[in-house]
Image (tube, rainbow, N blue to C red):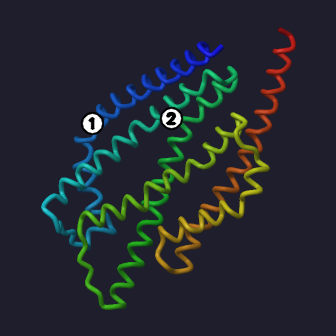
Amino acid sequence: MTNDKQLTIIEHIDELRKRLMVIVVFFVIAVIGSFFIAKPLIHYLQYTEEAKSLTLNAFNVTDPIVIYLKVIIIVAGILISPLLAYQLWSFVSPGLHETERRVTLSYIPFGFLLFLGGLSFSYFVLFPYVMKFTMALSQELEITQTLGINEYFNFLIQITIPFGLIFQMPILTLFLTRLGMIEPALLVRVRKYAFFVLFVIAAIITPPDLFSHLFVTVPLFLLYEVSIIISRFGYRKFLKAEQQRQIEELNE
């Protein structure tokens, strides 16, 4: 019994190692490809409507290199994110029912689209508003902004990537519900705590004015409510699958 258990653990570790090796190999390939994407992307981000009026300075000799490498790594990470999700699914799928495997596999492209949706919302809607707010405030206070390119891109990354991850909430909730790891009732019980966390995230990201805060907080709250609705749908599917599995086990 102990040997069987140890063998199972060793097999899981070996499987995990293989998955990680695949991710590393494709990440390296994505990094190589991102070298050709990073430069035009940096140029585009430097000359958008929000940035073209700014003079972006390099305060350190290594700032251009640092920005270049950051963009390469982030682009590579985005490119392999579907593969990363697939490897995670492949690792846990042996413990799933056949129907659950097919259904949860279909979540991967939707998760990627939601990630892109979060990036688009933060970049095309939130980021311009924040830039206009800060520039207007600087003029009112008669402050001349001297921006470093490193600080500008760090701020851009800080305000976009988190939203890409937060927009994964509905699909992640559905995935965990289909696995039976969470229930809609749990999401309802912890709603006030989840709202508080989302409220804090919005406060960190947005400028310190009420409209900006509501501008971000309300969509996040709605996203959580949508996650609860989706979870209820997924939980009904989970209970149905469990009932079918029990019937199959009794017939064997």
Give coordinates of residue 251: x percent, y percent.
Answer: 86, 10
The picture quadrant where one finds residue 232 is top right
Q: Nearer the viewer, residue 223 or 187?
A: 187
Reply above or below: 237 against 252: below
Mark 2 or mark 1: name the one nearer the start of the chain: 1
Image height check: is 95 above or below 171?
above
Type of amino acid at the residue the image marks with label 2 = Ala
Percent x, y for residue 118? 50, 53
Whether pointer 2 and pointer 1 mark residues with C-beta atoms closer than 8 Å, the reply is no
Check disc 2 and report its element: helix, strand or loop.
Answer: helix
In x, y percent, where is residue 230? 71, 45
Locate residue 189 relative to residue 222 in the image: left or right.
right
Q: Position of residue 61 (x, y in %)?
A: 12, 61
Residue at the far left: name it. Answer: 61
Label annotation for residue 85:
2
C-alpha gap between disc 2 and disc 1: 20 Å
Instruction: Find the residue positioned furthest to the top.
Output: 252
Image quadrant containing the C terminus:
top right
Mark 2: give few (<14), some (14-19) or many (20+) Cα within 10 Å. Answer: some
Q: Is residue 1 above or below residue 169?
A: above
* Label placed on residue 132: none
Quarter occupied by residue 160: bottom left
**Residue on which the image places disc 1:** 33
Q: Amino acid at mark 1?
A: Gly
The residue depicted at 47 percent of the width and 66 percent of the height is 126
